[in-house]
Image: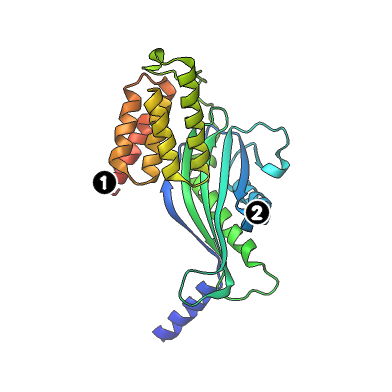
Amino acid sequence: MRHAMAAVAAAAAACQPSATVTQQSPIANLQTYRVALVRATAGADAQGWTAPLEAVVADRVARVCRFDAVLPAAQAGEAQADLIVDLSIQRLARGGDGVLQNPNKAVMDVLLVLSDGAGDDLVGQAWIRGESPAVFVAGAVPEEIAAGAVADSVARLLAASGCGLARVDPPPAEEEPPGGGTGAEDADSDAVARAEQLNDEGKRLFRAGDLEGAATAFAGAVAIVADPRYYFNLCFAYEALERYDDALAQCRAALDHNPSDRLRAKTQTRIDIIERKRAGK
């Protein structure tokens, strides 16, 4: 009887879509955000699935979050969003990863990156794998089912981060000009501009899933101008790479370089998160 029940359970599991979060940095409190923009990118082989992924993620997030609006990029127009939800489709394939390939099974690997829409600051990231059932479902498109599994996982992550709670006012905005930390006074305008370019490139690479490239770009920015924002971004990249000691060193360097009150609080929160990760908690 036990074997029969196990077989039934296995068969039922094979009929269900699934999603796993393979790598995640805890996401900041999302209660202060009001309008979320969902945008997806992909290589040529998955380009046709960016708009469907945007749409299904926007729909699932809107169901669980108390944002004023959740907009897929294709429908956003001129709308201003204070939370950017970037989805980079890194892989879309049929067959699964096992020795026995199943043509009915679609696998979609996505990098989720959350950014603050006002300051373009990195907020959080997660690697998500969505899979369709291993059995054929009449009338269903496996890639659509895999995208739906990814969307469910994104919605759960955001809900766990406070998007379903009552909205609260964000802290007062603080202007932090490029190269605004300790050491910037010794840098000329050309050096500051080069550092900003590297910092922007690092964020672009991070959102595209090139974490090593992002860390290299952020380190290059720090080498030119000792700006606490650059140290924080380098800390964030090292955290995503699970280089926790290096991450802590960079976050502490950010605190040593005259950050704004908002960045100081965000950096201290990051330090607490990384220390818990390093301790395996």
Q: SS of the residue at dot 1?
A: loop
Q: In this view, does 109 lie above or below 202?
A: below
Residue 10's spot in the image, x, y percent?
A: 47, 77
Disc 2 marks a residue whose amino acid type is: Gln
- Front in this rendered view, residue 257 or 221: 221
Label 2 neighbour load within 10 Å: few <14, some 14-19, many 20+ = few
Closest to the camera, between mark 1 and mark 2, is 2
Identified at 31% across, 29% down, the residue is: 252
Q: In this view, does 179 lie above or below 121?
A: above
Locate the N terminus and report the quarter of the image it occupies. Answer: bottom left
**Numbered circle sitting on residue 164:** none
Asked whether residue 265 appears in the rendered view, the answer is no
Q: Is residue 27 left or right of residue 36?
A: left
Residue 27's spot in the image, x, y percent?
A: 45, 41
**Numbered circle sitting on residue 47:** 2
Outermost residue, front side:
190
Identified at 41% across, 44% down, the residue is: 212
Asked whether residue 133 appears in the rendered view, the answer is yes
Disc 1 marks a residue whose amino acid type is: Ala
Mark 1 or mark 2: name the one nearer the start of the chain: 2
> Do labels 1 and 2 touch, CB within 8 Å?
no
**Cα–Cα span, label 1 and label 2:** 40 Å
Residue 67's spot in the image, x, y percent?
A: 61, 38
Q: Is residue 264 above or below residue 279?
A: above
Label 1 neighbour load within 10 Å: few <14, some 14-19, many 20+ = few
Residue 209's spot in the image, x, y percent?
A: 49, 47
Q: SS of the residue at dot 2?
A: helix
Q: Mark 1 points at which residue?
A: 279
Q: Is residue 29 left or right of residue 81?
A: left
